[in-house]
Amino acid sequence: QKEVEQNSGPLSVPEGAIASLNCTYSDRVSQSFFWYRQYSGKSPELIMSIYSNGDKEDGRFTAQLNKASQYVSLLIRDSQPSDSATYLCAADGGATNKLIFGTGTLLAVQP
Amino acid sequence: DVKVTQSSRYLVKRTGEKVFLECVQDMDHENMFWYRQDPGLGLRLIYFSYDVKMKEKGDIPEGYSVSREKKERFSLILESASTNQTSMYLCASSEGTGEAYEQYFGPGTRLTVT
């Protein structure tokens, strides 16, 4: 069974701090990884994609991928209360067109 | 921008009713997906389609069927709604394979079956 695992949280950080969200995946065949943000009662919104080992930065967000350790992370710099949401990690399902989603980490940014 | 729309944001149906949930995407995507999301269980894939008239079962297809007659439209059908199908239903689409696995979600339909 292909799995993506995340700590459910909540992860609580003060405003202005760096939030670090982590994810591990079980299938070594996976090549594409995604982070989605989901506000309460809303649908998931794609915020980052990463395909190669290393870091990828987009504004206050940095995605990190380590395929050898099967580990993906998302760093949010200068966290804002508006970043409070559930963050879903996803990996491609190998030869299928599907994504395997983790159950999400709830982030709470305290003003 | 990719736009995925769903026919209803909120829906209340009675046990035993046949329920249709519709999803439309405007980006000519090959793949379309139906998920349900429940607290503590995350996103669970019900069905997906990689081409017109093609469908594949996901992880929890029981009690559901789908239809894809046109590329842009993917419908989820609850043949006989039951209370355990009360959930948030999310439709998504993606372009295809390779680095185009990224999925874009519609706003969701919160279905209550009484």
Image (spheres, coloured by chain):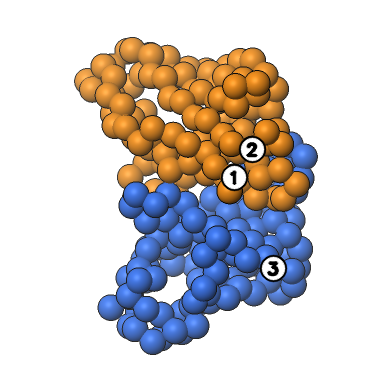
Chain colours: A orange, B blue
Which mark, by number, is residue A2?
Answer: 1
Amino acid type, residue under disc 3 in the picture: Lys
The chain ID associated with circle 1 is: A
Disc 2 target residue: A27
| Nearer the camera: disc 1 or disc 3 | 1
Amino acid type, residue under disc 1 in the picture: Lys
Which mark, by number, is residue B75?
Answer: none
Same chain shared by disc 1 and disc 2: yes
Marks 1 and 3 sit apart, C-alpha to C-alpha, by 21 Å
Image coordinates of residue B17 in percent, x first then y, are 41, 86
Image coordinates of residue A26 in percent, x first then y, are 59, 36
Disc 3 target residue: B55
Image coordinates of residue B16 in percent, x first then y, are 38, 87
- Callout 1: 10 Å neighbours few (<14), some, many (20+)? some
Q: Quadrant of the C terminus of chain B?
A: bottom left
For the residues labelled 1 and 2, say whether their Cβ atoms are less than 8 Å apart: yes
Same chain shared by disc 3 and disc 2: no
Image coordinates of residue B20 in percent, x first then y, are 50, 77
Secondary structure at badge 2 equals: loop
- Callout 3: 10 Å neighbours few (<14), some, many (20+)? some
Residue at horizontal 76%, vertical 63%? Answer: B51
The chain ID associated with circle 2 is: A
Whether A22 is drawn above or below B30: the answer is: above
Asked whether B84 or A25 is in front, the reply is: A25
For the residues labelled 3 and 2, say whether their Cβ atoms are less than 8 Å apart: no
